[in-house]
Image (cartoon, rainbow, N blue to C red):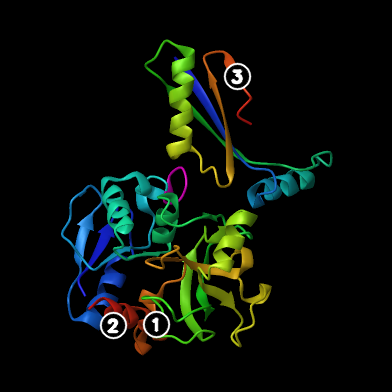
Amino acid sequence: MKAAVLVFPGSNREGDVAQAIELVTGRRPAMVWHGDGDFETTDLIVVPGGFSYGDYLRCGAMAAQSPVMAEVRRRAARGVPVLGICNGFQIVTEAGLLPGVLMRNAHLKFVCSDVHLKVETSQSLFTNRYQAGQVIRVPVAHAEGNYFADAETLKRLEDRGQVAFRYCAPDGTVDGSGNPNGSINNIAGIFNETKTVLGLMPHPENAVEPMFGGSDGKGLFEGMVEALS
Amino acid sequence: MKARVHVTLKNGVLDPQGKAIGHSLNRLGFPEVGDVRQGKYIELEIAETDKTRAKARLDEMCRKLLANTVIENYSIAVADEIDWKKE
């Protein structure tokens, strides 16, 4: 699996996700600068976390209009898988690749901690290494992760099984106790209709080695390798 | 000409910052303050002399970048005129 990791001014998790990809593929991904509207063909495009363009105006709003994202939109339309993590999730929603928006956390605080996620489906190129209903533990680090979509969009997401991950209690119960930011329906990550685009606020790339507090995120990368190699 | 854009959260969208501001004002001795909504104010200098054309361009700017219409409304004013019909 050949991957490209986008880099914007203010990205800061691009190295982490590149390392996670290298860990499972043995290949260093291509790092693609935001001004590069024509980069090499890859099996996967990753939009990493950070504070692209200083989060000016709205998180992800400026990055969504960059030359590299115009090309990502074209490739996503052709079915090239796109993974947006944290700020990357904000960028792909602002770019219109996923519905809804990530708002300021309901309690207004930056949240940096491990959370539990319920995997909603194993039927995707991103989640095939997990079981539906499985609970995994990965970290979050964000101030704007409060997912919101209007009632009609939300119903469509739920009806079509486009929710990928939900915040939950350690035992898998989906309620307010496990929700770190006020996200509607405890949504932590969603797919597009074809399940070729995944956006999520948590950082699976920071949970790939037991030495760093857990490896529950590794399955996401292994699953992609299996699906895309 | 000068243009002004106000971006505000739509009704029904939770505004925790507005709430926090309201609570602070209440605590500071302004019990008359009820609901508070916070927004953004953007001032632009536009190289255009026709108000209608300027507004059409500003509308496009709002839809493409300045506002996220999933959760935000915007209003545009050019020169001394304020256009509230976008609210």
Residue that appears at 49% across and 79% down: A121
B41 and B50: which is toward the camera: B50
In this view, A173 is above or below A38: below
- Judge if badges 3 and 1 mark residues of a common chain: no
| Dot label at residue B78 | none
Tell me the quarter of the image containing the C terminus of chain B. Answer: top right
Give the x, y percent position of residue A212: 37, 84
Disc 3 target residue: B82
Amino acid carrying label 2: it is: Glu
Amino acid carrying label 3: it is: Ile
The chain that hosts pointer 1 is A
Quick one: SS at disc 1?
Answer: loop
A229 and A108: which is toward the camera: A229
Inspect the magenta stretch and tell me whether residue A7 lies in it: no
Disc 1 target residue: A128
Q: Which residues are magenta?
A: A55-60
The chain that hosts pointer 2 is A
Disc 2 target residue: A226
C-beta proximity under 8 Å, tags 3 and 1: no
